[in-house]
Image (tube, helix red, strand yellow):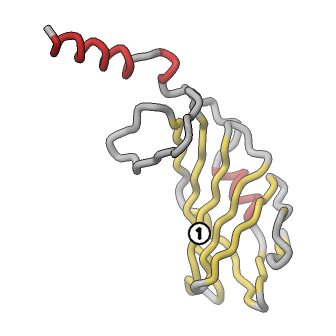
């Protein structure tokens, strides 16, 4: 009997409608991301361009997919989900890869994203608008194409 109670309680928690994955309707795609990142970038006299890889959309909730990485919070979290797009990046100069990074957009609409770069061991981050403008970073210069 105790096993049945635990089983039903677990099923009720996992199948709770407030924990369902969202059916996100993204209002942007890879074309908009590539457009925002197009052009040349310069930091510390190093000029490069950013090549975007494949996008990965995820609607995060209480139930993780089998292939998802672990995520935890040390404070009480709200029973909410968020929609996220993660785009892996390669940094190229003179035809060779000089670094990697990622571009993260939270939400179904792209107004601003978080750029996180590793340029030959140097970590850089900035917020980039959908029009390609750099926010919150005084060392990263973007010349749009």
**In front: 127, or 132?**
127
SS assignment at label 1: strand
Which residue is disc 1 drawn over? 101
Q: Is residue 1 left or right of residue 36?
A: left
Instruction: Residue at 60%, 76% (x, y): give it.
Output: 118
| Rendering coords of residue 51 (x, y %) | 62, 69
| Rendering coords of residue 78 (x, y %) | 59, 30
Instruction: Residue at 13%, 8% (x, y): give it.
Output: 1
Q: Is residue 117 left or right of residue 23?
A: right
**In front: 3, or 143?**
3
Count of number-bearing discs = 1
Instruction: Residue at 73%, 89% (x, y): give it.
Output: 46
Residue 47 can be seen, yes or no: yes
**In front: 3, or 69?**
3
**In front: 31, or 100?**
100
Screen quadrant of the C terminus: bottom right
């Amino acid at each position: 009997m105790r096993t049945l109670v635990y089983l039903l309680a677990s099923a009720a928690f996992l199948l709770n409608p407030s924990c369902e994955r969202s059916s996100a309707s993204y209002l942007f795609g890879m074309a908009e991301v590539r457009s925002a990142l197009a052009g040349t970038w310069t930091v510390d006299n190093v000029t490069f361009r950013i090549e975007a890889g494949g996008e990965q959309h995820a609607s995060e909730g209480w139930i993780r997919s089998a292939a998802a990485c672990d995520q935890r919070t040390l404070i009480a979290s709200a029973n909410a989900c968020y929609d996220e797009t993660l785009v892996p990046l390669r940094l190229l100069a003179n035809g060779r890869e000089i670094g990697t990074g990622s571009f993260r957009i939270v939400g179904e609409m792209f107004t601003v994203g978080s750029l996180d770069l590793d340029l030959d061991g140097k970590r850089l981050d900035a917020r980039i608008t959908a029009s390609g403008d750099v926010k919150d970073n005084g060392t990263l210069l973007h010349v749009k194409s």
